[in-house]
Image (tube, grey):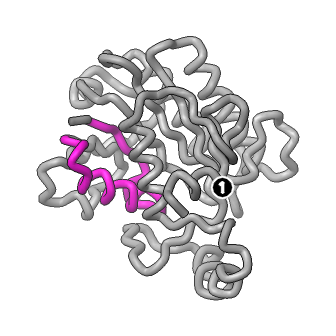
Amino acid sequence: MSHIILTGATGLAGSAILQHALSSPSISKVSILSRRPVAAADGNPKANVIIHKDFTSYPPELLSQLSGASACIWAQGISSIGMKEDEYTTITKTYPLAAAEVFKELPVKEKFKFVYISGRGADQNGKASQMFGRVKGDAEKQLLGIASGKQTFSVYNLRPAAIDPGKTWIAERKQNFVEKAFFSGAAPLLRPIMSSLFTTTENLAEVSVALALGDGEKITGEGVNPDGFTIENSAIRRMAGL
């Protein structure tokens, strides 16, 4: 059975990923890096909540708790709305890159898998007009660059479009105004006519965990970019059986 690392466990995607990972018979341990306690992990023998304040630093005492991990699902994130670019960049790019540089050196039997929850519209060519697309795209590009220099380290960039919490959302943080407006107002109208844009938290969790438990090799098929590691929303839906 596998030991995986998870960030963003109190958020929209991360909370669903946590529940899916804890219920998976293929996972023996989930090390959760979080700035605050994670109520959803309370009392679960598989969960190891590690209170971690500085996501640019991974001291030896922290790494000792991550010993044996074979994957990380990086679900930590924040909406770019109202954010200054330097602050958004720190959370969205600096933190995962710092973690990847450290985790690539963790001893593994085959490959360490780093699953980065990005988003539709991320542009690795730096041509996106929106800050979100530029920053996420550059994070993807640099993560793939780290992986290209380490044979035992793989990166998957997942690009969900509209992440749909459905009726089972259990995130511990409150929805912001935009999320509330979208999912209570626009989403019910859009789902019937634009269903291909929606990915439920459960489906995203299923695919994220499957990649974390996989072999770290390239993915093929419709909706997967030529690099074999950047996976668009349509491919996430296909891999989830939608």
Residue 145, percent from left and from top = 64, 21
Residue under the point 84% across and 46% down: 128
Q: Magenta part of the protein: which range?
A: 3-28
Residue under the point 47% across and 61% down: 203
Magenta stretch encompasses residue 24 = yes
Residue under the point 47% across and 31% down: 56
Q: Front-most of 198 and 185?
A: 198
User: How packed is label 1: few (under 14 Cα within 10 Å), some, or many (20 or more)?
Assistant: many
Quadrant in the picture for residue 197: bottom right
Q: Front-most of 194 and 153?
A: 194
Does residue 125 appear left or right of residue 49 in this picture? right
Amino acid at pointer 1: Ser
Q: Front-most of 54 and 67?
A: 67
Magenta stretch encompasses residue 124 = no
Residue 46, percent from left and from top = 17, 48
User: Is label 1 in a helix, a strand or a loop?
Assistant: helix
Mark 1 lies on residue = 234
Does residue 34 appear left or right of residue 77 in this picture? left
Does residue 216 appear left or right of residue 43 in this picture? right
Residue 206, percent from left and from top = 42, 54
Residue under the point 40% across and 25% down: 112
Q: Is 193 above or below relative to 234?
A: below
Quadrant in the picture for residue 71: top left
